[in-house]
Amino acid sequence: MANSASARKRSIQSEKRRKRNASLRSSFRTAVKKVRVAIGSGDTDNALLVFRSASSVIDKVCSKGIIHQNKANRYKSRLSQRIKAIASPSQ
């Protein structure tokens, strides 16, 4: 346990940040999962709609430093590729 007043304050601040970060990380994962479900259903229009909202969530989480910029771009790129694949099947 923290002994000094400043250490106690830092402990409280760290806990607040940890909870906020966990919440944002959870919303990020939920948004990605919703897109994957929409892609799995095969509905291109719905998948695009959900992808747009997920892109916003991904960008917000990235801007707050929860995930790295490259990871955010990688997620958006891969989801976009999967949506394009169901939009125009190459069979």
Image (cartoon, grey):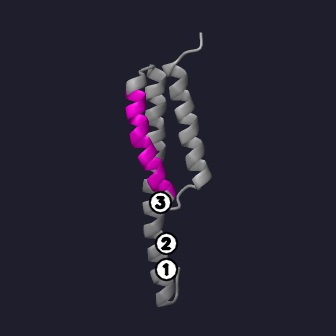
* Residue 59 rendering spot, x and y as whole percentages: 47, 52
Check disc 2 and report the residue beneath it: 14
Looking at marks 2 and 3 on the same chain, the residue that comes earlier in the sequence is marked by 2
Magenta span dominant secondary structure = helix
> Which percent across, then down, holds residue 28?
47, 47
Q: Nearer the viewer, residue 1 or 84?
A: 84
Location of the C terminus by quadrant is: top right
Q: Amino acid at mark 3?
A: Asn
| Amino acid type of the residue tagged 1 in the rendering | Arg
Q: Secondary structure at mark 2?
A: helix
Q: Is residue 27 among what the camera can see?
A: no
Query: Does the magenta portion include 59?
Result: yes
Residue type, mark 2 in image? Ser
Q: Can residue 9 be seen in this snapshot?
A: yes
- Name the residue at 43% across, 42% down: 54
Q: Which residue is mark 3?
A: 21
Residue on which disc 1 sits? 10
Mark 2–mark 3 distance (CA, rounded to whole Å)? 10 Å
Q: CA distance from mark 1 to mark 2?
A: 6 Å
Task: Describe the element under mark 1 as helix, strand or loop.
Answer: helix
At mark 3, the secondary structure is helix
Please name the residue shown 42% across and 55% down the image.
23
**Residues rendered magenta in the picture:** 46-62
| Of callouts 1 and 3, the N-terminal one | 1
The structure residue drawn at horizontal position 49% and vertical position 31%, both measured from the top left corner, is 36
